[in-house]
Structure formats: C-alpha cells, structure tokens
Image: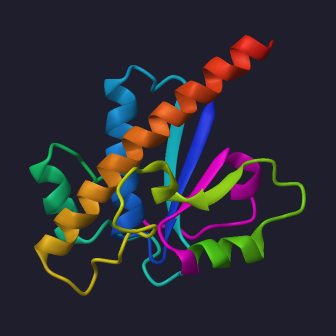
Amino acid sequence: MKKSVSILFVCLGNICRSPTAHGVFEAMVKAEGLSDLISVDSAGTGDWHLGRGPDQRAIRAARSRGYDLQHLRARQVCAEDFARFDYILAMDLANLSNLQGMVPADFAGQLSLFLDYSDLPRSSEVPDPYSGGMDAFEQVLEMIEAASQGLICAIKDRSIAHKQST
C-alpha cells in the first residue's frame, strides 16, 4: 500500500452522516492496523454547523456500537480538499452533484458515492437521518458499516494490484 491514502466523507451539514462515516471508518482502519497508512476526515457542503460537534443522536447511536464521534467538529468542503484527498465520498446524489461542481480539472482522486463500496441492495444513497428518530440513525450506521468494509477491501485490492504492476 502506498504510504498514505486519504479519504474525505461528505454530507450536507457534517453533523450526522459524514461524521458517522468518519468515526466508523477510522475505527475500522485502526482495527485493521492501517492507521499509519490511511487518513480520514469529513466535511459538509453547507456551512450551517461549522465548528459544532455531531448531532447527539449520531453520537449516541455510534457509541452504542463502540464508535466515538465526540472529538469531531463540522467543517465545510474547500478547494484544497481536492488536492489533499485520494477519495472524496458523498453520502447522496445532491452532495455528489455539489462536489462535481467544485472539482478542479486536475483532480486525480476518486469522487463518488460512498455506498458505491457497499453491497447493500437497498439504495445508492445514505439517507439524511436529521429529521428522523434514533431508528434512522441506526439505519445509517448499518449502511455506513457495510460501505466502510467495502472501502477497506477496495483500498487493499487497489494496493495489491499496484504492487503487482510495479
């Protein structure tokens, strides 16, 4: 695997879905022993919650499965992110469209939907749980866990393919 792979998870306000993906994926990376190789961040396309921590329901749902989100703070996607990250993964089509409108011509990374890495048949989008109850946050966690496993496998497979070609 190359020395560093960087991933940015993106939703609208960076208080529900993308920080959940950030925390879950970061924990899975650590469990795989890949923390020295993979860096993780999250951001939102909107600026409503800058500097705030994740939604308390997201924190509770994540904590119930052993993930810690409390250290995360909302920030907005910026132009520099396209130079810093190898993978920029949107939670839904609207945010993917917003990101596609920002992407510079020289972006060499992967810009796609996060659930492209999941084998879940239900949806290509992680639904926004903000207006729902705890069950909506639990559903989002299930989707994010599945996609996180798929993303780790894809990164490992890409690294193996790269090693074999060099």
Camera-side residue of 161 and 68: 161
Q: Is residue 119 left or right of residue 151?
A: left
| Residue closest to the far front | 121
Picture residue at 42% right of the left edge, 62% below the top = 18
Q: Is residue 89 above or below residue 153?
A: below
Q: Is residue 104 left or right of residue 68?
A: right
Q: Is residue 112 above or below residue 7?
A: below
Picture residue at 69% right of the left edge, 57% below the top = 81
Camera-side residue of 122 and 135: 122
Question: Does the stretch in magenta take in 93?
Answer: yes
* Residue 56 can be seen in this image: no
Q: Position of residue 146 (x, y in %)?
A: 33, 48
Q: How many marks?
A: 0
Picture residue at 70% right of the left edge, 14% below the top = 163
Picture residue at 51% right of the left edge, 22% below the top = 36
Q: Which quadrant holds the N terminus?
A: top right
Camera-side residue of 117 and 81: 117
Q: Position of residue 68 (x, y in %)?
A: 24, 47
Q: Quadrant of residue 27?
A: top left
Q: Is residue 21 above or below residue 122?
A: above
Q: Which residues are magenta?
A: 74-94
* Residue 141 can be seen in this image: yes
Q: Quadrant of residue 86?
A: top right
Q: Position of residue 58 (x, y in %)?
A: 23, 65
Q: Is residue 6 left or right of residue 163?
A: left
Colour treatment of the image: rainbow
Question: Does the stretch in magenta take in 161?
Answer: no
| Residue closest to the far right | 105
Q: Which quadrant holds the C terminus?
A: top right
